[in-house]
Amino acid sequence: MHWHQQTVVLPAQRRGLHLITDVLVERMPTIRACRAGLLHVFIQHTSASLTINENADPDVAADLEQSLNDLVPESGPYRHSQEGPDDMPAHVKASLMGSSVTIPVGAGRLLLGTWQGIYLCEHRDQGGRRRLVLTLSGQFERAEESDAVD
């Protein structure tokens, strides 16, 4: 078993769900050398989150965003309000959605379902750049083993 880890910084996004699957695969090329393993993706922020959901119809992401806004309105009686009206609701949404996803990897690709993709859920109007820690563990083709960290 070998481990690869790196940090990926994503550019600032508008509020909503943003498909990032291809960006993660591009930024961590060691996935292509993984015969069998797991990719863990962790977001280092408390007002954004990660999820896996349908990647074929963009209405799904829009409907998820609307559902989150309906569940967690900005008008709530929040005590934590110094960072703007979208901050505390963003913390609640991030807790509901989660800070990480884990995806099986096999034969050099993510083993997501046909219609699945990894989404960055930006819960702030002006969230800024987002840092993700990608940790890949598994069995790698011999050419990559010399680069792996035990």
Image (cartoon, helix red, strand yellow):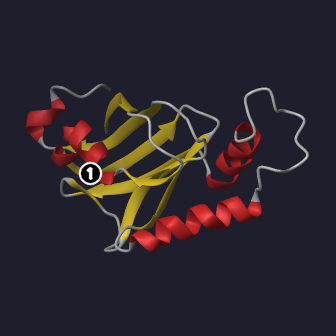
Q: Residue sitting at 74 percent across and 47 percent down?
A: 92
Hey, what amino acid is under mark 1?
Asp
| Whether residue 28 is visible | no
Residue 126 lies in quadrant: top right
Residue 8 picture location, percent across and down: 36, 31
> In terms of depth relative to the viewer, which is nearer, 30 or 2?
30
Q: Residue sitting at 35 percent across and 71 percent down?
A: 113
Up-down relation of residue 134 to residue 98 (above or below)? above
Residue 89 picture location, percent across and down: 74, 46
> In terms of depth relative to the viewer, which is nearer, 116 or 69?
69
Q: Secondary structure at mark 1?
A: helix
Which residue is disc 1 drawn over?
A: 22
Q: Residues within 10 Å of mark 1 (few under 14, many from 20)?
A: few
The reply, left or right, for residue 84 in relation to residue 41 is right
Up-down relation of residue 3 to residue 141 (above or below)? above
The reply, left or right, for residue 140 in relation to residue 18 is left
Residue 47 lies in quadrant: top right
Residue 138 picture location, percent across and down: 31, 44
The N terminus is located in which quarter? Answer: top left
Q: Residue sitting at 44 percent across and 41 percent down?
A: 13
The C terminus is located in which quarter? Answer: top left
Q: Residue sitting at 16 percent across and 45 percent down?
A: 33
Residue 40 lies in quadrant: top left
| Whether residue 75 is visible | yes
